[in-house]
Amino acid sequence: MTTDPFKWEEAYTDDICIQSALQEDENGSMENAIRRIISEEKRLRRNEGRPTRIRLGMMRHVFVGIDLSTSILSKDVEPSRLRVVRECLLNFVNKFFELNPLSAMGLIIGRDKKGDCSCGFSSSLQKLTESFNSLNEVSCGGTEFSLHSMLETALNHFRNVPAHTSKECIFIVASLSTIDASSLKQIYEQLKMQSVRCSIISFLAEVYAFKKLCVTTQGKYGVALDKEHFDLLLTEHLQPPPLKPKQGHQDSIVKMGFPIKKAKKIPSFCACHELAGDALDLSKQNEYAYICPQCGSHYCQTPTNCRVCGLLLLTAPQLARAHQHLEPLPAFVESTPIEGTTCFACDELLFSSIKAYFCKNCNAQFCIECDILLHESLQVCPSCG
């Protein structure tokens, strides 16, 4: 009895029908099919209720790692992969700090089989925006990408992060392979022991080594189809993830302070730039300063850790925004609207061919755009909230 050497392919393709998923239109284009897939994925995400009564890592330290090998210069995603990544990241970082005011973000770039920290952990929107804007064709170099080097760089920086924070990495990879000097399995286990959650967004195809990393560290793995889908995959990382339980780790109280905001009468240096050795343009200084209530040091922005006494400085509105994740807005019920009715929020007409979403408490109906806005930003129903 002979066995089929390609029997494993049947198990992989039983539930996949490429012809039904990607249908060409009359012009031979598959853009409409891709839009339909993205719309369906967005619709399914709206039906997922966010878990309640669980511990969330609201104080997040997130590294964004970007593969800057020559693969990212490909133009299979218009206008190019690099420009799509830069534009989506600039949009992502604004939303990230709006929903995660107690968090910090850093940037790691990978090229020539090396991983370099381009921007350390910072809560400064201006500093991160400048780092992302500096990514251009000149920054790219080499055809070889090393995932191990980027992970090693991230681990070295996570050693100085407080134990009560959530440690995460989001890697954007354009290569289909990784060339590493050491075994990936060993560093995967180190990341797991350090409770570092790693997620990857790839272009073109799924890679086993990348997916294995995400499975091991309980992260997310996705393959971007186009710019809209890439932006959708990035937004999955806006909400704080559940905090992993740590053996032998006891809960501790985090000491915080509300700084005093005062106007500057004369130009002066702030502790965040002076002690860090960063150059500060006096013409770009703020007209006010935040004064640490414990030691009196001056800072130009919050949240930040005082470099003199170590106190976490943040404002009351920032702390209030962070608490919105503890009581998330329940997912609305998907239903077919009555023809001619309108969305409660934007007053746009709803059609029976497009699904609408109903609040469980007040039965107000919303379009999918308003539903996304309410669940990702406002966290309140405008009808019953």
Image (cartoon, rainbow, N blue to C red):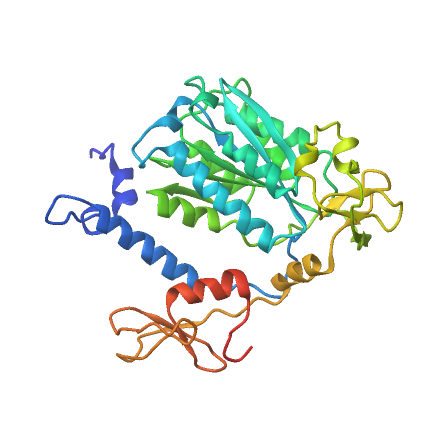
- Whether residue 312 sits left or right of residue 82 in the image: it is right
Specify the farthest residue to the bottom. 362
Residue 3 occupies quadrant: top left
**For this rendering, which residue is in front, 13 or 170?**
170
Q: Residue at x 33, y 42 (%)?
A: 226
Image height of 61 relative to 326, above or below:
above
Specify the farthest residue to the left. 26
* Image quarter (top left, top right, bottom left or bottom right) of the N terminus: top left
Q: Residue at x 44, y 43 (%)?
A: 88
**For this rendering, which residue is in front, 327 or 126?**
126
Is residue 350 among the parts visible in the rendering?
Answer: yes
Instruction: Residue 360 in the image: state x and y as whole percent.
Output: 47, 78
Q: Residue at x 43, y 73 (%)?
A: 345
- Whether residue 281 sits left or right of residue 83 in the image: it is right
Is residue 241 among the parts visible in the rendering?
Answer: no
* Image quarter (top left, top right, bottom left or bottom right) of the C terminus: bottom right
- Whether residue 136 sits left or right of residue 306 in the image: it is left
Instruction: Residue 116 in the image: state x and y as whole percent.
Output: 58, 24
Instruction: Residue 132 in the image: state x and y as whole percent.
Output: 52, 35
**For this rendering, which residue is in front, 190 or 385?**
385
Image height of 358 relative to 242, above or below:
below
Instruction: Residue 352 in the image: state x and y as whole percent.
Output: 26, 74
- Whether residue 108 sits left or right of residue 222 in the image: it is right
**For this rendering, which residue is in front, 211 or 330?**
330
Residue 205 occupies quadrant: top left
Q: Residue at x 32, y 69 (%)?
A: 355
